[in-house]
Image (cartoon, coloured by chain):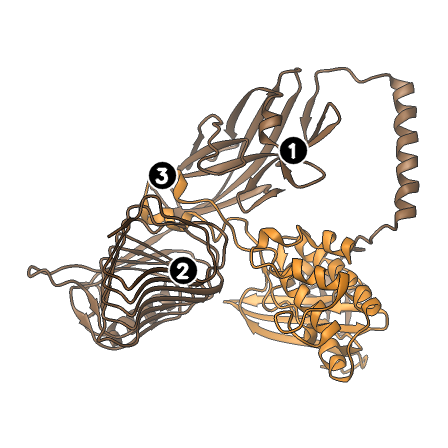
Chain colours: A brown, B orange
Amino acid sequence: MKSCPHCGASLQEEASFCPYCAQAVNERKEIQPPRHMPGRALYSALIVLVATAALALLTFGVRSRPKVYDNGNAEVIYTSQGTKYQLCIAWADYPFQPAHQRYADGPTDEIYRYPALLYANLADSETYADEEFLELVDHMTAEVTGLDEELQMTCAQPVRDTDYVPNTAAIVYVNYIATAIGEYTAELTISLHMKNGDVIRLHQTQLVEIYATHDYTAEDAPMDTVQDLEALLKHIEETVDQKDQVSIHLPPVTYTEKLVLDGRPVNLTGSRDESGHRTTFTDTVQVDTKSGVVWFFEDIDFVGRGSGTGLSASARVYLTDCRFAGWDTGVLAHTNSWVVAHESTFEDNGVGFHFNAEHGSPSDPRFLDDRFVNNGTAVLLEQVPNGTPLDFSGSQFEGNSQDIDNRCGQKLELEGAVFK
Amino acid sequence: MRHKNSGKRFIFRKFTGNGEVYQKLLGLSCPNLPLILEAAEKDGENLVVEEFIEGDNLGFLLEGALFTPKETREIVKQLCGALWVLHSMAAVHRDIKPENVILRGKDAVLIDFDAARLHKPGAEADTQVLGTTGFAAPEQYGLSQSDVRTDIYSLGVLINVMLTGEHPSKKLAEGHMGRVVQRCTQVNPQKRYKDVLHLMEVV
């Protein structure tokens, strides 16, 4: 317990506010947002800065080389021959904004790999300068430090691979596996050893959260009808931590009623009986959740009768080996959505796959090894929420009235696609 | 609500969701954000006590008249300052609209963080895909993160509404401010202003 400094009332230790005298009782940091500095003030400040620098130069002489540049974070500004470079570890979609931390999550005992991207830009103009900067670099190294006992994280040495992510100076692949549930921290350090002897060090904190996994089969709960599924999802919502991963293994039955999924995301995996019949939905499956977590659907048929929508998603959805047949629209990705399909089939639909989402963070931009057969329009791109090119490598288009109606002008990679 | 003894007025919020941003604001004070006096959370239910801001919101004021470019610039610069504080603590407001801006004298105050959340870089990006694909090729993931420039987009729309009364897709503001709005509302976040300080500068 503590006392209110204003009225002396007895308060809980963590209280920020005194309900007796209506005064704030916690310490606050006053923040004045930065103000735009008028040109004249800026000019005056510049003069002072130049004069100070000149005085320092006269006093201490020219600094000696080589020098280590290390701000303890993911960005260093480095000047060479009058050119100011920004070196930073960043995301591909924000290449000029240093990412001092990187967040990753997953279940235990699974191996993960992701790339850390190093950019070399011109500091003043948000322009890539990887090629000219790399001429100044002798070699680069990378290491991971500060590991917990349960987190095994390693990294490869930096490689240049602009085919994978354009405009990067180097990519460092980070691998990890964790053996216990928990939150872990490690630090990735990339060192650039310059030809003139300077060393530039960039650091990115790796935050890894490992969660539990739960699997449900028809032996654990009834799964014969949509009502059964709704009851199971409600039970999971109430009993399982939101952070945990849930996989539901569906029996090879046909669900004939509409299923609305608007709670916590789960992975839905279908199955096949001896006669070859797979788990099937004959009415719309609607996925509507604001969470950024991905819903996975695997090995499931969505079979319509010439109208309606097979899967309507305003969420992030990942489809593997699913089949959409006989719908007005096979898959509709709308509002806050990113849907991607691998090894899936879209056949005999008015529109096979319709992308019309205003927002949505991509999980994977590739539509690999899909089949689009006998649709009115196989792929309709009305609005795609991110400029990342969609890659249709290995996908087949056959017998569609129109293969791709790219109304929003999305960049596409069609080199590996087959159009019959 | 009104405090019985002192007569002071406060806003009492009760909402379901993530209250992390309110927790962070407990330790701060900024002229363009309301003072958060208490914030408590249990099982996703949040209770917040915050300063009552005396003034009219922009939504109400816009019913009477549009703002001049000069007035708009002054207000937007202050909103950029408020957002700078939020973005500095890795939070995104996500609900910038006229009704959430109150004019208190010359100060513009940004309110309502019920939709705000702390931004975890990469939290929506890659590893979810990885979770079921195991040791997959690196090109499969890691290319994106959730959008921290959502607020800049909304601010662009707000600027346009203050000047024209319309969404930019219907009627774009004229001149320099119109160009600012255009850049703020680019569909591709990468083409928007890098951060609110850039926006503050061009405004």
Front residue of this view, candidates A166 and A263: A166
* Dot 1 amino acid type: Gly
Q: Which mark is residue B137?
A: 3
Q: Residues within 10 Å of mark 1 (few under 14, many from 20)?
A: few
Q: Residues within 10 Å of mark 2 (few under 14, many from 20)?
A: some
* C-alpha separation, residue under disc 1 versus residue under disc 2: 35 Å
- Tell me the number on the disc at residue B86: none
- How packed is label 3: few (under 14 Cα within 10 Å), some, or many (20 or more)? few
- Give the alpha-carbon distance from disc 1 to disc 3, as whole Å: 30 Å
Is A175 above or below relative to A54? Answer: below
- Label 1: element kind: loop
> Which residue matches tag 1?
A72
Q: Which residue is mark 2?
A: A241
Q: Quadrant of residue B23?
A: bottom right
Pick the front one: A419 or B110? A419
Q: Chain of mark 3?
A: B
Q: Point out the image quarter for the N terminus of chain A.
A: bottom right
Q: Is residue A254 visible?
A: yes
Q: Amino acid at mark 2?
A: Asp
- Residue A91's place in the image compared with B78, above or below, is above
Choose top left, top right, bottom left or bottom right for residue B114: bottom right
